Image (tube, grey):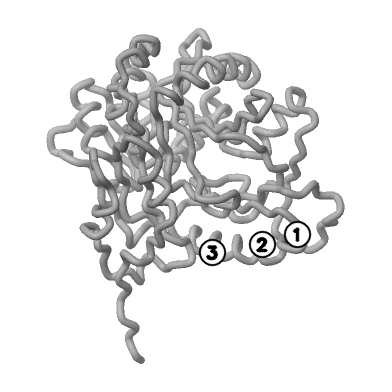
Amino acid sequence: MIILDKPYVSILLSTSVKNLQIPIIKVNDVSIPNESGLTITKKEDFLREFQNTQSPLLFNSENGLRILNEYLPNHYLTTIAATLKNKAEFRRVLTKHFPEFFFREITFAELDDLDMNSVPFPIIIKPVVGYSSIGVYRIDQKEDFIDSINMLKEDMSMAGSAYPKDVIDSQTLIIEELIEGDEYAIDAYYSEDGKPVILNLFKRMFSHEKDMSDRIYYTSKQVLKEVLHKVEDFLESIGPIFGLLSVPVHIEVRINSKGLVVPIEANPLRFAGIGTTELGVYAYNVNVYEYYFNQLEPDWDSIMENMDDSIYSFCCAEFDPSIDCKAIESVDHEAFKEHFQEILAYRPMDFNAYSTFSVVFHKASNFEENKRILSLDLSDFLTMKELELV
């Protein structure tokens, strides 16, 4: 079964679930491509459908997770989702395995009384319940703390009107020590006997050390060769800790200079958001929907042997959260496209509802294109509405 909710359903997702004959629950009037050809059940029938189907469960968006609390409050998947989605609880569970890792849960109200000398700068501060890079800040020294908190508050104010509290909760924050190292995003599922199966492995690319944006992730034969087996071992180690059985996850980790895999966060019952998980189709022909619902495992050795040496990336064209989405008149998509050499797919997004105006899948022979895209000021592609004089 799949629960489809805002912000975005791709044509590939819609076509895949149709071909797989997966039961569909539609939530919050999300726009679904080719919906007339699909068999869709109302949210109110979720419990009946869930009990009657043997199909694994998947959400395309965290927006829909509230349906678990509404209809399955005592189910083990609801418990797992609550633990993984809450970044502070996720850290508490892992404390025994990473005892030296500093983190602290704190409310906005408690920030004013925070003893700066008790915090091991540099740090990351972010919402305990959050999505994407919204409200995530790196703070290198205590002198920068107040300015960063003020910006975080602005982000949360903007996000509060676009995302439900289940997705972004602006009241509680987590402060944690900075994890040095390369960052990776993994789409995987745990089988019914707890075996982790990796479906995607993306590496995150930053423009500078304080960049917290999700603008560029990429994958390649080299990325897979370097860390695939190390990540598999890590997933095997944390599965029993959380009791991960028959569950899909999107996990973000960093691998430090000593080769230690350190978890950043785990997002339950979904893969990479707004369709970005589909980069794997272009890079190594892995359709996560087909693999997950059929409980298939990619033959990674064969995939790596047959891959070319290209860099396969997705770009989330996410503009500054301080920009009011509703104040945007238009986006110059054609001008933005000119910055890519080989576009595999270009997907415009609803820029009046969310702070991303497109997702671009693209291919290049080296990293120069990604470096250039990371340096772009995306506001240059926006035309704002004229202010109305009252």
Reading the image, the residue beneath label 3 is 157
What residue do we see at 50% from left, 21% from top?
A: 226
Mark 2 Cα-neighbour bin, 10 Å: few <14, some 14–19, many ≥20 = some
What residue do we see at 52% from left, 15% from top?
A: 229
* Above/below status of 309 relative to 276: above
Amino acid on which the number 1 mark rests in the picture: Leu
Q: Which mark is residue 149?
A: 2
Mark 1 Cα-neighbour bin, 10 Å: few <14, some 14–19, many ≥20 = few
Reading the image, the residue beneath label 1 is 111
* Above/below status of 330 relative to 237: below
Task: Tell me how far mark 1 sits from mark 2, CA to CA.
Answer: 9 Å
Q: Secondary structure beneath disc 1?
A: helix
**Residue 88 in the image, given as x and y percentages of width and height:** 68, 39
Tag 3 near tag 1, CB within 8 Å: no
What residue do we see at 73% from left, 46% from top?
A: 105
Task: Tell me how far mark 3 sits from mark 1, CA to CA.
Answer: 17 Å
Observer able to see residue 253: yes
The label nearer to you, 2 versus 3, is 2
Quadrant where the C terminus sits is bottom left
**Residue 350 in the image, given as x and y percentages of width and height:** 30, 56
Task: Tell me how far mark 2 sits from mark 3, CA to CA.
Answer: 12 Å
Question: In terms of image quadrants, where is residue 365?
Answer: top left
Q: Is residue 258 left or right of residue 314?
A: right
What residue do we see at 28% from left, 57% from top?
A: 336
Q: Secondary structure beneath disc 3?
A: helix
Sequence-first tag of 1 and 2: 1
Amino acid on which the number 3 mark rests in the picture: Ser
Tag 1 near tag 2, CB within 8 Å: yes
The label nearer to you, 1 versus 2, is 2
Amino acid on which the number 2 mark rests in the picture: Ile
**Residue 362 in the image, given as x and y percentages of width and height:** 29, 40
